[in-house]
Amino acid sequence: MARIVVVSNRVAVPTGERGARAGGLEVAIRSFLKRNHGLWFGWSGRIAAKAEVATREVESGGVTYITTDLTRADYQEYYNGFANRMLWPILHYRLDLAEYSSLDLTGYIRVNEHFADRLHRVLRPDDVVWIHDYHLLPLAKALRDRGHKNRIGFFLHVPFPPPEILTALPKHERLILSLCHYDLVGFQTETDADNFSRYLKDECRMPTQDRYTFLAGSRVVRLGVFPVGVETAEFERLARRSARSSFVQEVVGSLAGRAMIIGVDRLDYSKGLEERFLAYERFLDDNPDRSEQVFLLQIATPSRTGVDAYKDLRSRLDTISGRVNGTHATVDWVPLRYVNQPYRRDELSGIYRAADVALVTPLRDGMNLVAKEYVAAQDEKDPGVLILSQFAGAAEQMRDALIVNPLSPEDVADAIRRGLDMPLEERRRRWQSLMQGIVRNDVTAWRDAFVSALRSGVPA
C-alpha cells in the first residue's frame, strides 16, 4: 500500500512527556501514521538565521518526522502576518480584524514554496499526500509545478466563509483557486463545503459535474465533508483514571459543594470568551439565589501573543473578570476563576468529568473538539450538560446539547440555569445520544473516510 505523507504547519514530534496535552491534529493523525509507516512533514518551530535554516529527519515509533526551520522574516510574514492577521480572521468571518499586507502575502507564498522544495526531495511517485489547514492553501500547486502527479488531498480544520466574505481577501482568486490543484478538498461541515462550492460556481464560473465535483482545466477536484472526531474510548478511559489523581481531587475539593461550569479554549477572539463572560455575568445578575452555589472555571491558554487583536482581547477579559468578581465575590467565594495557563490532557479530562456544565460557545469554529472531549469524559451515572454554540461545527452533529446563540447573553444565561437545574433523567438521555454520536464518528472514522476518499477519488 502507498505511503501516507502528512503535511502541516507544525509537526508534532513526540517529546516523551507523559500526559502532555496533544493538539487536535496530533491526536487525529499520529496513531494512523504509526500503523502505516508514514511520514509527517512541516515547520520545526525553530527560527534560524537565513544561512542556518536546516531540515531534520527523525524516526520514532514507525513514523518518519521531517522538519524544516523558518527565518525570522518567514515567521513574521507567513505565520504572524498573512496566516494569522489575514486568513484567520477572514475564515472566521471577522473582516473587521483582517490586516492585509502584500509583503505578508509574498512571505506566505515563499514559505509554501520552501515547503514544496523540501518535499520534492523525499516524495515518491506513489505517495498519497494529505495537507492540513489554512497555512498551506497553495502547497499542492507548488508541488504540481515541480512535476508531482501524486494524489494530494487538503483538509481545512477551520470554517470556510461564504463568497460574500471571502472575496474581501485581496487577490483571492490567486490563492483560493490554488485549492483546485488538490484531488480532494475536505471540510468540517456541509455549510463550509457549500460555501466553497458556491465560490467556485458563482465567482469563478467553474464547470461542475455535480454539487461537489468541479472541472478545473484538465483536473477534477472533488469536495467532501469529513467532521473531525476524538479518540472517544481512549479519552473516556483517561478521564476515569484522572478523576482519581491528586490534582483532580484537589480541584474537586475546592468546589466546596458548589456546581462547576467549565470552559477550555485557546485565548482567541473566535472562541467567544468575552461574550461568554458577559453571559455569565448576566446569569449571576439574574439569579441572585445562585450566589455562592456555582462558579465558572475558564482556562484560556494564550496564543499568538504577537498579534495586537489577541493582546486587546486579553486586556478586555481581565477587565470583565475583575468586574464580575468585584461585584459578586464574597470572602470565601470567587464566582469566576480565570486561568491563563495550559494543562495536560489527562488533567483536563479529569476536570471535564468533575464539571456539571461545559460552556463551549465560540462565535465561529470549524468543529470544536472540547465539546466532544467533554461528553467523552462524563460519568454515565451522573453526566454533565453541554452548552454549545450554534456557530460551532460540532453543533451540526451534537443536537442534544443545549444549542445557544453566543451573541445573546440572555440565551446563554438561560441555558446555564437550565443546565444546572436539569433532572438526572434528561441529562442521561441527552448524554447517551451525544455519546453514541461521538463513538460512531470518532477520529478513526474521520481519518479513514478522508484517506479512503482521497485514494479512491470518490468522497464518502
Image (cartoon, rainbow, N blue to C red):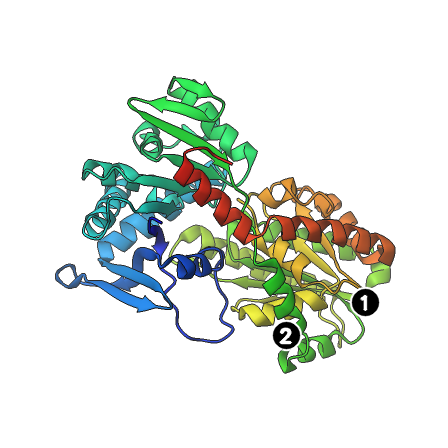
Left or right: residue 248 compared with residue 132: right
Give the vertical position of 256 relative to 41 (above or below). below
Residue 65 vs residue 175, the one in the foreground: 65
Q: Earlier in the sequence, mark 1 or mark 2?
A: 2
Residue drawn at 57 percent across, 55 percent down = 230
Left or right: residue 334 compared with residue 79: right
Q: Amino acid at mark 1?
A: Gln
Residue annotated with mark 1: 293
Q: Amino acid at mark 2?
A: Ser
Give the vertical position of 192 relative to 252 (above or below). above
Residue drawn at 49 percent across, 71 percent down = 20
Give the vertical position of 117 relative to 297 (above or below). above
Residue drawn at 48 percent across, 55 percent down = 28
Q: Position of residue 152 (x, y in %)?
A: 34, 40
Q: Position of residue 129 (x, y in %)?
A: 33, 46
The crowding category of the residue bearing disc 1, from other C-alpha atoms within 10 Å (few below 14, some 14 to 19, many at least 20), is: some
Residue 125 vs residue 21, the one in the foreground: 125
Residue annotated with mark 2: 242
Whether residue 286 is visible:
no
Q: Position of residue 170 (x, y in %)?
A: 33, 31
Give the secondary structure at mark 2: helix
Give the vertical position of 371 relative to 218 (above or below). below
Residue 382: mark: none
1 and 2 marks in contact (CB < 8 Å): no
The crowding category of the residue bearing disc 2, from other C-alpha atoms within 10 Å (few below 14, some 14 to 19, many at least 20), is: many
Which tag is nearer the camera, tag 1 or tag 2? 2
| Farthest residue, direction bottom | 246
Residue 410 vs residue 344, the one in the foreground: 344
* Residue 184 falls in image quadrant: top left
> Could you give the CA–CA distance between mark 1 and mark 2, rounded to whole angstroms?
25 Å
Q: Position of residue 151 (x, y in %)?
A: 33, 39
